[in-house]
Amino acid sequence: MKDNPDPEAQAGQLEAEADRAAGHGDPGQARALLERATALDPGRGETWLKLAAMCRAQGDLPAALGAVGGALRVDPLGFMALLLKASLLEKSDRIEEAGETYGYALAQAPATIPPHLDAMIAHARAVHAARVAAAAERLAGATGAAALSEIEEARLARFRSNILRRTRPYHSEPTHFHYPGLREREFHDRASFPWLETLETATAAITEDFRRVMAAERAELVPYIQYPDDVPLRQWQALNRNEAWTAIHLVQNGVIVAANARHCPAVMALLPALEQPAIPRRGPNAMFSLLAPGAHIPPHTGVANTRLVCHLPLIVPEGCWFRVGDETRRWEPGRAWVFDDTIEHEALNPSDALRVILIVDTWHPDLSAAEREAVAAVMAATDPAEAMEGL
């Protein structure tokens, strides 16, 4: 090798010589050259991986792990480096660490896996799954003698699944209005909304309301999302004016839609008990939501975390599901829930039939009566026309 004062160039030449040595079946010579190359230029991630392979070929697992550590110092999230580290840990009988590291590697896996890695990836998944299952069993038995309520048990179960990374935290991300300090929950506890049972009891009558309004000649069925094309909200592109997701509004932005509402006495009689946000030009809202066969509502978030959304399923074909954050549920006719629509959510109707639910909004239960009044005033004042009216 010619003298070259540039360490990076020297390292490159050494690596090329190491490649030739490895090709000739001399891992010892290749290793020595790669050790010199990494000493000259420690920022060469691929060189560290080649060094790890030569050390492994010689059966020197500690040195191979050290070399992989060099690659991970260059790129801590490197997929191949993590995969190789996990494999070396497994060969070293460090199974718990191997399972965890396989999990890190799988989290960084590219969208397309080269075919020659298929068997290794399948093995990584199996080892990681076994590690998670063992950890889940250990955590499940760690509660002790604590007497927990049903709600507390559910929260503890989510705590465990977050630790195991089967789930992850999701946060409220409203597009417009974020009120600080409100609890972030994907699906809120039923105990906070005593009127849910009354709503559920009326499911049959509400379903009749829907059938009646659908049969009416003057019923107004419109796309659920309707925004001007130039509004800077990319999430609405797939939803905007999409006739696969439509609505029959009974109350829209605080205004009763008489053409529809007059056919729905059961719904209209129940609305006053739901603690709905009364905000000029924004609420309350009540509607039938219709999702066409095969339609998918892509992930998106709502406008304001000061209000929550209630679903009362009426007509639910087989296979329909709804995801909020990391919790996915199946709609069941007559079984209502309240969720935070400012946490990422999506829905799918994979069937060949129509899915129908009643949607209403309600105040977030953490807001006091005084806060509700103040929030309504502030949100109304964001509309220039409303602000001018108050002058």
Image: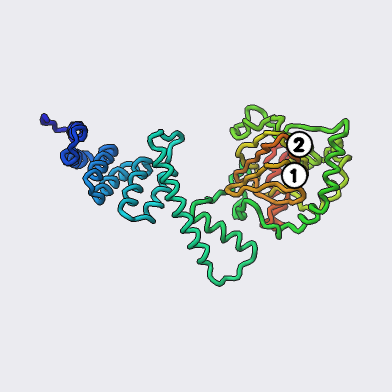
Among numbered discs 2 and 1, the one appearing first in the sequence:
2
Give left or right: position of 169 versus 116: right
SS label for mark 1:
strand
Tell me which corner region of the image, top left, top right, bottom left or bottom right, holds residue 26: top left
Tell me which corner region of the image, top left, top right, bottom left or bottom right, holds residue 24: top left
One can see residue 285 in this view: no
Spot the residue most to the top. 229
SS label for mark 2:
strand
Give left or right: position of 141 versus 83: right
Amino acid at the residue labelled 1: Ile
Q: Are marks 2 and 1 in contact (CB under 8 Å)?
A: yes
Crowding at dot 2, Cα within 10 Å, few <14 / some 14-19 / many 20+, comes out as many
Residue appearing at x 32%, y 44% in the figure: 72
Q: Which residue is mark 2?
A: 247
Q: Quadrant of the C terminus?
A: top right
Picture colour scheme: rainbow
Residue appearing at x 85%, y 40% in the figure: 261
Residue 227 position in % (x across, y down): 68, 31
Residue appearing at x 33%, y 44% in the figure: 84
Crowding at dot 1, Cα within 10 Å, few <14 / some 14-19 / many 20+, comes out as some
Residue 235 position in % (x across, y down): 60, 35
Q: Quadrant of the N terminus?
A: top left
The answer to which of 199 and 341 lies nearer the viewer is 199
Q: Which residue is mark 1?
A: 359
In space, the residues marked 2 and 1 are separated at their CA atoms by: 10 Å
